[in-house]
Image (cartoon, rainbow, N blue to C red):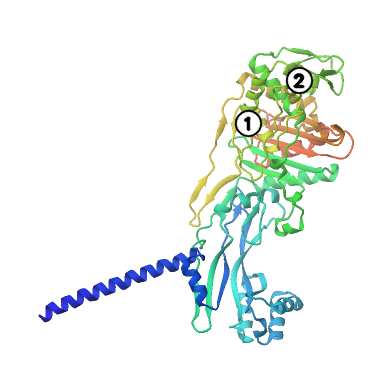
């Protein structure tokens, strides 16, 4: 009987213990629920029964952005923030504490004094972004002045860009809340993490305090990202950009270089630019990535595409010749002119000498459907969507034949530098590759979660016969035509100059003074490895043409990039 009683007692005890565990489980679930939503009924009841509720932010680590070779472009540096009790009158030995903190951090004592004097109904942030190596020394100061109950430290992170303005318009920046606001910092928020998580502290004079730790955003969720940018290439492009700005004093500059084997963007330089470590000191215009956010009429850069299409479709042959007459042609109610009279010239010479008249006569064979097909083949009718704020090309109404003719010389149609670079790469290889700016995403454990792979958007833009003709012709543009200032002693370069007059909205016509100059090309022309574009918006000076302003810098770009990657000069064979 005693044994039976014990069995019954054990069962009841087990049942009570199980019930206790179940209740404890539900209590924990509710507490965890509170960590996610403060607006729940229980949270409100707790607030009603406690004197004060303080919400504090817990800073979270943000992953790094690196270049293609693992060099850090943006990283989070550990810091500490010094907080004081909301009632700063409670701080003991105030002057000793202020002078000591000033001595340790180098912050003027008066500045610290002002922040302490201000007071608040929330914890007072005395100093933020202090080097975490000073943490122990500050903690000793807090103890020695008797302020352990009134002054505390909170660890956090500060975003640092160790290379200053290098690739700044591509990288963007992180705001004071630890979240990316522009550029790739913004685009990569879901991978990099960062920001803050909230924790609630419920205070009551008699009951003490309840501290609810955040559920989300803990260490380990952040990831590191490798971009396709190569710091060595980026430095080359930015030095060239600076030289262009120094000589031509333009409004804007954009330079982009792509690897033709996989579509990787190896470098992207813009002007104006900024230092993301001090982004608040710069106007918004300086923080834009003009290579993708702004579109320009490409001018004569469009000519190889229209002539190549007409040749590929059989509307003209390589033996086709054009009579350019007196160097002008009437397109409906407006005359279009060449820079000089060329007379009757071959199809190749139309491109070599960049004849507007010759190009328009060839483009007259193309229909609306042809032009739509051409733009589709080279992805010149839409953006790629790999950058924040990337602008779509602007295509005119092709139902009007005049718009087809003007588009052939790059007027009335507009696109960004990235679109031009990818399209010109198609002339080099016959393929349109989707460009990449993200190379890899690496987890906190070091595992590759994403790795960019070659993505072919169009495998055959023109026949190989047409491509060979175009490559030879574009090489002649550089060797003896409008692009001869881009001619290199070491490497063969194929390219095209472009000069586009900007439309003046006030005058209602194209400006004679405001132009955009281009050079787009690929190299080595004998075995294309890279494609690049240089755009200079509103240069100042004389002879404002693509062959004068942009072409000389393309030669420097091609030679320096080729030697950087160890290519052997193909002109010395």
Quick one: quadrant of the N terminus? bottom left
Element assignment for label 2: helix
Choose top left, top right, bottom left or bottom right for residue 359. Answer: top right
Q: Residue at x 77, y 29 (%)?
A: 299
- Find disc 2 in the rendering and name its residue: 359
Residue 133, x across and y down, in percent? 62, 72
Element assignment for label 1: loop
In the picture, the disc for residue 50 is none
Residue 425, x across and y down, in percent? 65, 31
Residue 269 vs residue 232, the one in the foreground: 269
Disc on the earlier residue, 2 or 1 = 2
Instruction: Examine the rendered structure and indicate whether residue 68 appears above or below residue 118.
Output: above
Q: Residue at x 34, y 71 (%)?
A: 23
Choose top left, top right, bottom left or bottom right for residue 27. Answer: bottom left
On the rendered structure, is 276 left or right of 441?
right
- Find disc 1 in the rendering and name its residue: 379
Quick one: quadrant of the C terminus? top right
Residue 41 vs residue 64, the one in the foreground: 41
Residue 204, x across and y down, in percent? 52, 80
């Amino acid at each position: 009987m005693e044994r039976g009683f014990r069995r019954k007692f054990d069962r009841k005890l087990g049942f009570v213990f199980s019930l206790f565990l179940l209740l404890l489980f539900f209590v924990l679930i509710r507490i965890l629920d509170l960590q996610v939503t403060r607006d729940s009924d229980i949270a409100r009841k707790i607030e009603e029964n406690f004197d004060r509720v303080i919400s504090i932010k817990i800073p979270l680590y943000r992953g790094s952005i690196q270049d293609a070779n693992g060099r850090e472009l943006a990283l989070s540096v550990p810091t500490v923030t010094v907080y004081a009790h909301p009632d700063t009158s409670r701080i003991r030995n105030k002057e000793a504490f202020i002078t000591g903190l000033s001595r340790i951090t180098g912050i003027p004592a008066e500045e610290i004094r002002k922040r302490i004097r201000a007071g608040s109904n929330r914890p007072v942030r005395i100093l933020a972004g202090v080097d975490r190596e000073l943490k122990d020394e500050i903690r000793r100061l807090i103890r020695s002045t008797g302020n352990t109950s009134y002054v505390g430290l909170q660890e956090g992170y500060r975003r640092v860009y160790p290379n200053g303005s290098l690739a700044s318009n591509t990288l963007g920046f992180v705001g004071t809340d630890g979240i990316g606001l522009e550029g790739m910092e913004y685009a990569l928020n879901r991978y990099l993490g960062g920001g803050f998580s909230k924790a609630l502290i419920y205070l009551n004079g008699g009951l003490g305090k309840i501290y609810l730790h955040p559920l989300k955003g803990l260490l380990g969720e952040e990831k590191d990202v490798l971009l396709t940018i190569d710091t060595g290439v980026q430095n080359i492009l930015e030095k060239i950009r600076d030289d262009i700005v120094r000589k031509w004093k333009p409004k804007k500059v954009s330079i982009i270089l792509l690897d033709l084997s996989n579509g990787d963007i190896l470098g992207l330089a813009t002007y104006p630019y900024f230092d993301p470590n001090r982004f608040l000191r710069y106007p918004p215009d300086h923080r834009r990535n003009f290579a993708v956010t702004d579109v320009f009429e490409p001018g004569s850069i469009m000519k190889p595409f229209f002539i190549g299409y007409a040749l590929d479709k059989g509307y003209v042959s390589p033996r086709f010749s054009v009579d350019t007459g007196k160097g002008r042609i009437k397109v409906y109610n407006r005359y279009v002119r060449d820079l000089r009279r060329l007379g009757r010239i071959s199809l190749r010479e139309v491109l070599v000498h960049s004849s507007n008249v010759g190009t328009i006569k060839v483009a007259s064979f193309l229909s609306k459907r042809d032009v739509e097909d051409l733009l589709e083949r080279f992805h010149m009718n839409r953006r790629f969507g790999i950058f924040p704020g990337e602008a779509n090309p602007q295509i005119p109404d092709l139902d009007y034949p005049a718009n087809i003719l003007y588009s052939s010389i790059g007027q009335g149609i507009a696109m960004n530098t990235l679109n031009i670079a990818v399209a010109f790469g198609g002339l080099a290889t016959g393929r349109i590759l989707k460009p990449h700016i993200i190379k890899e995403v690496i987890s906190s454990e070091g595992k590759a979660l994403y790795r960019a792979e070659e993505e072919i958007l169009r495998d055959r833009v023109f026949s190989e016969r047409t491509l060979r003709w175009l490559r030879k012709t574009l090489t002649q543009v550089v060797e003896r035509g409008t692009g001869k200032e881009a001619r290199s002693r070491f490497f063969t370069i194929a390219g095209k100059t472009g000069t586009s007059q900007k439309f003046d909205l006030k005058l209602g016509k194209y400006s004679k003074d405001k132009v955009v100059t281009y050079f787009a090309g690929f190299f080595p022309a004998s075995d294309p490895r890279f494609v690049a574009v240089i755009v200079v918006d509103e240069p100042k000076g004389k002879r404002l043409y693509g062959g004068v302003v942009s072409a000389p810098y393309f030669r420097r770009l091609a030679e320096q990039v080729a030697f950087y990657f160890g290519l052997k000069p193909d002109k010395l064979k």
